Amino acid sequence: MVPGKPIIVKSLREQVYEYLKAELKRGALDTDSFLDLNKLAKDLGVSRTPLRDALIQLEVEEFVTIAPRRGVAVRSLQPKDIQEIYQLVGALEGAALMAVGPTMTAEDITHLRELDQRSQRAIDAGDKDGFYETNYAFHDFFLNRLGNSRITALVHAKKQQLYDWNRKFERLHVNWENSGVHEHEEVLRLLETGAIPEAAAYLRDVHWGFNVQEAFVNQVYFTEQG
């Protein structure tokens, strides 16, 4: 405990929520089948109330579906879900880049290029956590510069659906990650020339273009075995 720092005690709802998210991430909860809520509450040693509250939050985040009089089912990502998430994230990140592009300096470009270089080193070393840290930082640069907390929260929530809970992302997919770093570099090249609309369109339509990334999406989500 750090002297002078308050002790933060998480509520039962928060503890149950974090447990369920961890179980989703490791693929321990069957998708598209109804959960046994009585057994789950008993196993966790909690009442139905914190479990219900945690599941409501997971439904808001679209990880589960609550069906009246039927129960709670864990969702699985389908191609249409991924396509819609790509369109949403691409539109928001592209708009953020379009808005903040005129304020970016040579130092900003250098910083982003250093993040890309760190990403490439992480890929080469097989460092999944290092790669995702720098990859998020690259994209968050534009969002943070925009300063719209609601847009940032929405983008993060959608990315969480794509990456954080899916156990297939427990390791790197080198070809896809390498391609992503090269696409980042193209965004930076366009920014350096002052082609801000073109950079924003490239980020939206190529880097987050479902049709462009579809082969990788199909390989990772629907071909590889978990």
Image (tube, helix red, strand yellow):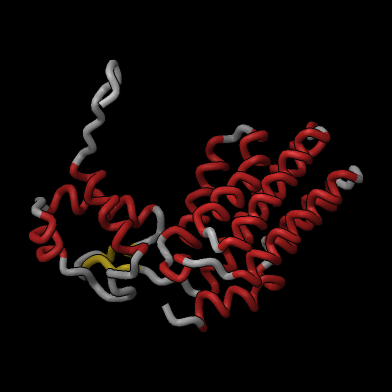
User: Which sits in the foreground, 38 or 174?
Assistant: 174
Quick one: which residue is furthest to the top in this view? Answer: 4
Q: Which residue is at a point 47% across and 55% down the rendered structure image?
A: 160
Judge left or right: residue 173 versus residue 7. right
120 or 173: which is nearer to us? 120
Q: Position of residue 129 (x, y in %)?
A: 50, 54
State the image quarter where residue 20 is shown: bottom left
Tell me: residue 175, above or below residue 136. Answer: below
Quadrant of the frame with the C terminus: bottom left
Whether residue 54 is situated above or below residue 149 in the rendered picture: below
Residue positioned most to the right: 193
Q: Is residue 180 left or right of residue 164?
A: right
Which residue is pictured at 49% across the width and 81% down the height? 224
x%, y% of residue 139? Answer: 64, 47
Looking at the image, is 123 positioned above or below residue 14?
below
Seen as rendered, the residue at the extreme front is: 125
Q: Residue at x 70, y 51 (%)?
A: 117
Say which residue appears at 71% left-offset and 46% top-offset. 95
- Residue 94: horizontal and vertical position, in percent? 71, 50
183 or 214: nearer the viewer: 183
- x and y percentages locating residue 32 in the rendered image: 33, 75
Which quarter of the rendered picture does the N terminus lie within? top left
